[in-house]
Amino acid sequence: MTVRVRLGAGLARLSAAPLKTVQLAEGATVGDLFARLAEDEPDLAPALRSVLPVVAGEHVTRDQPLADGQEVALLLPVSGG
């Protein structure tokens, strides 16, 4: 299946492109997506430990199954006041 990945500003600077298309096996989860991204782009791997995945406007966990054609936004948590 094909999943689109949109990297937030903090992550986009670590990647060749802010928008990626990733091929995954049917039934893949967000965790599987993270593993593929870390393998394909090792510079992203350290940042993926703290990334917040968002699907359809909602924060999801790493065990969330993905569907063909979905877009996953990856955002770094922000602190401050």
Image (tube, rainbow, N blue to C red):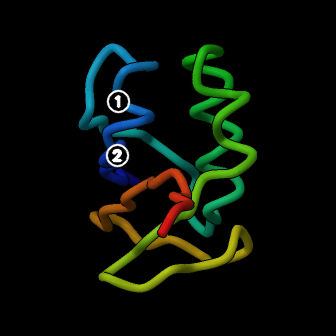
Three-letter amino acid code at the position of disc 1:
Ala
Three-letter amino acid code at the position of disc 2:
Gly
Number of marks in picture: 2
Per the rendering, the mark at residue 34 is none
Q: Which residue occupies 52% across, 51% down?
A: 76
Q: Find the distance from the CA under tag 2 to the CA under tag 1.
A: 6 Å
Q: Which residue occupies 56% across, 60% down?
A: 79
Label 2, on which residue? 8
Left or right of residue 72: residue 80: right
Per the rendering, the mark at residue 12 is 1
Circle 1: element type = helix
Q: Are marks 2 and 1 in contact (CB under 8 Å)?
A: yes
- Give above or below for 8 relative to 28: above
Residue nearest the observer in this picture, 68 or 38: 38
Circle 2: element type = loop
Locate residue 33, reporting x and y percent.
59, 49
Locate residue 32, reporting x and y percent.
68, 52
Q: Which residue occupies 35% across, 48% down?
A: 5
Residue occupying the far front of the picture: 81
Residue nearest the observer in this picture, 7 or 5: 7
- Give above or below for 55 relative to 30: below
Locate residue 2, reporting x and y percent.
35, 51
- Give above or below for 60 relative to 69: below
Left or right of residue 17: residue 66: right
